[in-house]
Image: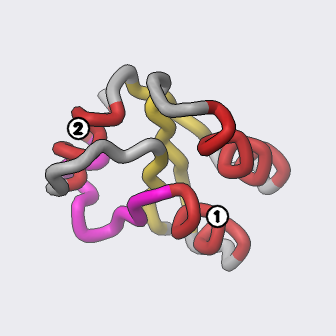
Amino acid sequence: MSYEKVTQSKNDVIIGTKQAIKALKENRVKEVIIAEDADLRVTNKVLTLAEELKVPVSTVASMKKLGQACGIEVGASAVAIKK
């Protein structure tokens, strides 16, 4: 389900944990999507900040598929969908 959201919102996605954290701090995110196979050390900051700011978080199974849904050839551990 969330892969489809990312694909449909391709022009409104922010790819990667650092960029997602920055966008969350700037209040530009309506939803965060995290890959379950990503390292928790990488995604934990995004998850914590999203919870603090009450931004909905969805999970998907695969970093590789999440990256493909974003239109990139590498895996993505976290993706933020812009407001």
Disc 1 target residue: 21
User: Which x, y percent locates residue 73?
Assistant: 15, 51
User: Residue at 56% across / 32% down in the picture?
Assistant: 39
User: Which stretch is magenta?
Assistant: 5-16
- Residue found at x 54% / y 56%: 17
Is 44 on the left or on the right of 6, as rendered?
Answer: right
Identify the residue at the far bottom of this view. Answer: 26
Secondary element type, mark 1:
helix
On the image, the x and y values in percent for residue 25 come to 72, 72
Q: Which residue is mark 2?
A: 4
Q: Amino acid at mark 2?
A: Glu
The crowd level at tag 2 (other Cα within 10 Å; few <14, some 14-19, many 20+) is few
User: What residue do we see at 66% from left, 50% from top?
Assistant: 46
First in sequence, mark 1 or 2: give its number: 2
- State whether residue 34 is above or below residue 73: above
Mark 1 packing: few (<14 Cα in 10 Å), some, or many (20+)?
Answer: many
| Quadrant housing residue 72 | bottom left
Instruction: Give amino acid for label 1.
Output: Ile
Numbered disc total = 2
Quadrant position of the N terminus in the picture: top left
Instruction: Residue 56: give its label.
Output: none
Residue lying at 64% horizontally and 64% vertically, measured from the top left: 21
Above or below: residue 10 compared with residue 28 = above
